[in-house]
Each structure stands twice: as structure tokens, then as C-alpha cells.
Image (tube, rainbow, N blue to C red):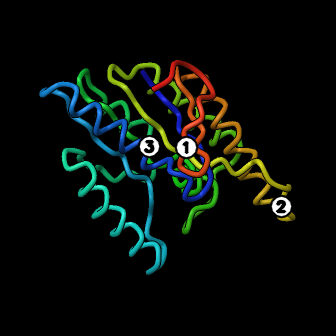
């Protein structure tokens, strides 16, 4: 069963996804779990943050392998998904940032973003194992002044809608508490 876990900064969404992976690994000896990390270290603070997350995640969920894929997410889901293997994608927000506002290169246009979104949803539909996707819910506030920021918020909202439609369960994390939005309780 696929699940989208949404929430604000430090809402507990990654911890919730890690808990899903830990439960999956404990459910059967043959189960595997792989985290697809989408972050890129654009500066020293982000590099430190990524390293800290790696260490903390390894301590919390020792059996969770990590694959770093900041760009070709749909291809990674297709390649890594297998029966008996849970994938955790952390996170869609950073993946979309690499597409819409890259540190280097040209931002993807609306058609390219739509194609990436469709490719990801196609990979989810074809995935033979469960996938848990993490993303930031940033569209609850006031519309920002910048056209680029508004474009990004719109693109992330469209991505969330498409991925939520491809998932059986959607969970919103609020202050560390999971709120069921769609599907059966975990």
C-alpha cells in the first residue's frame, strides 16, 4: 500500500515514515526497506544537516538502506521497487526543488514538471512493493510576493494532488501527531 505523509517543517513526517519502515522490517524476516533521499547539499549547513539525518536514521532504523537520487526519482522507484521491499521517498519537496529551482542549470517549465509528475505517478502505479512518500505541506499560508515562489507552491500542490490520488493512504503530521486524511489507519 502506498502512502503520502505530509506536514510542515519538523512536524514528524520523516519520523513517521521511518516508523513505517521499522514496522515493515519487523513484520517479516525477508522484508527489505530502502530510503530514496532526494536532498542536495548546496551549502555547508545543508551538508551538515544531511550528514546528521544519515546518522540519526541509521540509529533509529538500522535495516533501512539509503540510495541518494535527487533527480531521477521515477526511475529510482521503478528500479528499486520489489515485492517484499518498502521504499521511503524523503522528500518530494526537495526533489521538486531540484526540478523547478535548481542550484545550477535551467528550471523545468510547466510541461516538464507535468511530465515528471506523470512519470512518478506511473512508477507508483507500477510499483510491486509499498512506497511511503514524504513531503512538506507549504500551501497553507499567505501567497508569497515572488512569482517564482507562487509557481513552486502551485507545482508542489499539483504534485501532492497527483501523488495522493496514486496512494491508498494520506497522512498529515501535525506537531508529531498523525492525522488520517485518506485511507485506513496505520
Q: Quadrant of the C terminus?
A: top left
Characterize the local packing of mark 2: few (<14), some (14-19) or many (20 or more) Cα atoms within 10 angstroms. few
Task: Report which residue position mark 2 lands on.
Answer: 144
User: Picture coordinates of residue 171 (x, y %)?
Assistant: 56, 34
Q: Nearer the viewer, mark 1 or mark 3?
A: 1
Which one is nearer the viewer's eye here, 102 or 61?
61
> Which residue lies at the image location 26% right of the left edge and 29% below the top edge?
85
How far is disc 2 from disc 1 in space, using C-alphas?
Answer: 27 Å
Q: Disc 2 or 1, which lies upstream in sequence?
A: 2
**Residue carrying label 3:** 16
Q: Secondary structure at mark 2?
A: loop
Q: Is the C-beta separation of discs 2 and 1 under 8 Å?
A: no
48 up-or-down from 165: above or below: below
Q: Residue at x 28, y 53 (%)?
A: 60
To which residue does mark 1 refer?
177
Label 1 CA crowd tier, 10 Å (few <14, some 14–19, many 20+): some
Q: Would residue 184 appear left or right of 131 to someone viewing this image?
A: right
108 or 18: nearer the eye? 18
The reply to whether dot 2 and dot 3 touch (C-beta < 8 Å) is no
User: Where is the N terminus found, in terms of image quarters?
Assistant: top left
Q: Quadrant location of residue 101? A: bottom right
Amino acid at each position: 500500500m502506498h502512502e503520502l505523509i505530509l506536514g510542515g517543517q519538523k512536524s514528524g513526517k520523516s519520523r513517521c515514515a521511518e516508523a513505517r519502515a521499522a514496522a515493515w522490517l519487523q513484520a517479516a524476516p525477508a522484508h527489505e526497506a530502502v530510503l530514496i533521499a532526494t536532498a542536495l547539499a548546496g551549502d555547508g549547513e545543508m551538508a551538515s544537516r544531511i550528514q546528521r539525518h544519515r546518522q540519526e536514521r541509521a540509529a533509529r532504523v538500522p535495516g533501512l538502506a539509503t540510495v541518494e537520487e535527487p533527480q531521477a526519482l521515477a526511475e529510482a522507484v521503478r528500479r528499486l521497487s520489489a515485492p517484499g521491499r518498502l521504499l521511503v521517498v524523503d522528500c518530494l519537496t526537495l526533489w521538486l526543488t531540484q526540478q523547478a529551482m535548481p542550484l545550477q542549470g535551467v528550471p523545468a517549465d510547466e510541461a516538464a514538471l507535468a511530465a515528471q509528475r506523470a512519470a512518478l505517478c506511473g512508477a507508483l502505479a507500477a510499483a510491486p512493493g509499498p512506497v511511503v512518500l514524504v513531503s512538506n505541506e507549504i500551501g497553507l499560508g499567505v501567497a508569497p510576493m515572488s512569482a517564482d515562489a507562487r509557481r513552486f507552491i502551485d507545482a508542489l500542490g499539483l504534485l501532492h494532488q497527483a501523488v495522493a490520488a496514486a496512494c491508498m493512504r494520506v497522512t498529515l503530521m501535525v506537531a508529531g501527531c498523525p492525522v488520517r486524511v485518506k485511507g485506513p489507519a496505520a
